[in-house]
Image (spheres, rainbow, N blue to C red):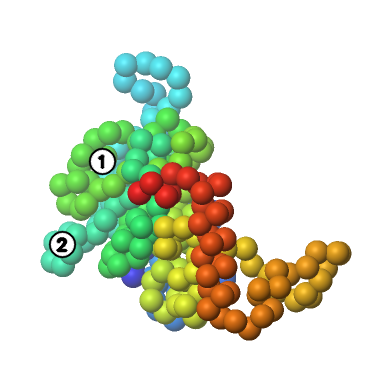
Amino acid sequence: MRLDIVTIFPEFFDILDISLLGKARRSGLIDLAVHDLRDYTHDRHRTVDDTPYGGGAGMVMKPEPWGEALDEVLPQDPAGQQPLVIFPSPAGDVFTQAMARELSTEAHLVFGCGRYEGIDQRVFEHTATRARVRLVSLGDYVLNGGEVAVMAMIEAIGRLVPGVVGNPESLVQESHENGLLEYPSYTKPASWRGLDVPPILLSGNHGAIAQWRHEQQVERTRRVRPDLLES
Ligand SMILES: COC(=O)COc1cccc(COC(=O)c2cn[nH]c2)c1
């Protein structure tokens, strides 16, 4: 999988060189490139924003730098499948585990990190003439920019790319993988500060343990996220 990120804070993504994704990058499973939007400006101050037409507070990201950055990142002659360009936005489709699973099968993802009051609307319109474009929301709150959202999405997507996580089994019993929240987990010691591990987990009866864990998932989901039981 090829990942490109366009941002005015490229150093924000240095952390992707370590941990799981660092290993996936070194093994060639994931090919990541970060692009500084300011490298596509031509004035002395490397300006990426300007005042909004129609007035109002704040600044809007200029279309020209985005156009030139995406000229470089998007294939000129999209022979194969068109890349998918994702812009984090409060106005986007909500990011879910199902979306992460779907996106983990893409060959080429491009992430555009907005800042200020947003990106000039024509960037989305023009990019849609040469790639698939999707606005994606992490939730109903506002961040100062797309970088944090992109980091979260890359982690959620990257760990689903075959080979990135050592034991694929560990991806199954997870919150949201089977539509339910995960069961509570325990490890040694069997008793800690007067708190004991549920005896069923020490019984060695794997059928009963699986049943208990499923019951815990349903009970926790009903209590914390009843909306997940409706779908
Ligand atoms: C139309 O989209 C744009 O112009 C993108 O521009 C911006 C501007 C500021 C902040 C962000 C980051 O996204 C969020 O705040 C966000 C995503 N999920 N929940 C909150 C993006």
Residue type indicated by callout 1: Phe
Q: Residue at x 31, y 33 (%)?
A: 120
* Residue 204 to residue 79: above or below: below
Q: Residues within 10 Å of mark 2 (few under 14, many from 20)?
A: few
Place of residue 229 in the rendered image (x, y in percent of width and height, measured from the top left)? 42, 50
Of the pair 70 and 203, the residue shown nearer to us = 203
User: Residue 52 appears at what percent x and percent y?
Assistant: 36, 23
Q: Which residue is mark 2?
A: 78
Within 10 angstroms of label 1, few (less than 14), some, or many (20 or more) residues? Answer: many
**Relative depth, front residue between 163 and 109:** 163
The three-letter amino acid code for the residue at tag 2 is: Pro
The percent coordinates of residue 167 (x first, y second) are 49, 80
Q: Is residue 119 above or below residue 154?
A: above
Establish whether ligand 1 lies closer than 8 Å to the Cβ of label 1: yes
Task: Determine the residue located farthest toward the bottom in the rendered image.
Answer: 204
The N terminus sits in image quarter: bottom left
Q: Which residue is mark 1?
A: 124
Specify which label sits upstream in the sequence, 1 or 2. Answer: 2
